[in-house]
Amino acid sequence: MEQLFLIVDLEATCSDDGSITSDQMETIEIGACWAKRDGGVIDQFQSFVRPTINPVLTSFCKGLTNIRQTDIDDAPSFSVAAKELFDFMKRYQIADAVWMSWGMYDRKQITKESLAHQVVDPLPITHLNAKRLFAKAQKIGKEVGMARACSLAQLELEGVHHRALDDAKNIARLLPWILAERKFVAAAANQ
C-alpha cells in the first residue's frame, strides 16, 4: 500500500494586544487531510472547537481566521473534536504512518490541550515538521511560512489562508517539495 501522510493544521484563539498569551491559546478549528506523496488529497476532516478560557473571539482573531463567533459557540469541546480527529487518523493508518504540520506549533498545541482536557493524544503516530523538511529539501536555509513556501513552489494558495482545512490542503499540495521529490527554480528563492 502506498504511504499516506496525515496533514494537520489548527487555528487557535489569539489577540494582537496581549490579552491572550501563548499559553492561553485554545484550538478553535482542526483541519486534517490524508494525502498521497504527490499531494493528492484522498480524505479530509474539519471541526470547529469551542474554547473555554476565552470563549469570545477577539476582533483580531475573527479577522485573521475568518472564523465567526457563531461557528464556535455550539462547536464540540476539544475532547470531542480530539476523538473525531483520532477516528479520522485511524481510517488510513498503517504501520509507518506519520502526521505533519507546518512547524511545531500544532504538535505542541495538541499535546498541551490533550493534557489540559485529560484526553489521550489523538495523534499517537510520528510527527514530522513539514516546515523544516521543506527548508532542508529545497536548500533554502531558513524556514519560511506556508504561504511563502507555496509561492516558492509556484503554487497559488487555495481556499482561505488561516483556515485549518484549507491550510492543511495547501500543505498537502507542497508534499512533493517537502519530500524532495520536486525542486523549485533557485531564482524563485531569491525573490
Image (cartoon, grey):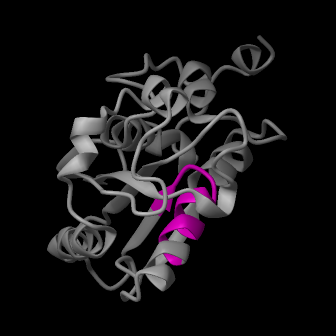
State which region is magenta.
100-111
- Quarter of the picture holding the N terminus: bottom left
Whether 163 is among the magenta residues is: no
Judge from the rendering whether residue 10 lies leftward or rightward of residue 182; answer left or right. Answer: left
**50 horizontally vs 125: left or right:** left
Q: Is residue 191 left or right of residue 95?
A: right
Q: Name the foreground residue: 75 vs 5.
A: 75
Residue under the point 73% across and 49% down: 136
Q: Quadrant of residue 98?
A: bottom left
Depth order, front residue of 104/3: 104
Say left or right for 164 vs 87. Answer: right
Residue 105 colored magenta?
yes
For image coordinates 77% across by 10% down, the residue present is 191
Q: What residue do we see at 81% from left, 16% from top?
A: 190
- The answer to whether residue 150 is above or below residue 124 is above
Q: Position of residue 26 (x, y in %)?
A: 48, 58
Q: Residue at x 46, y 23 (%)?
A: 63
Front residue of this view, candidates 126 and 106: 106
Extreme residue toward the right, this view: 141
Pinpoint residue 180: horizontal percent, then vertical percent: 58, 46
x and y, in percent, of residue 167 in the image: 41, 37
**Circle count:** 0
**Could you say which quadrant of the image residue 162 lies in?**
top left
* x and y, in percent, of residue 88 in the image: 19, 68
Task: Classify 68 as above or below 164.
Answer: above
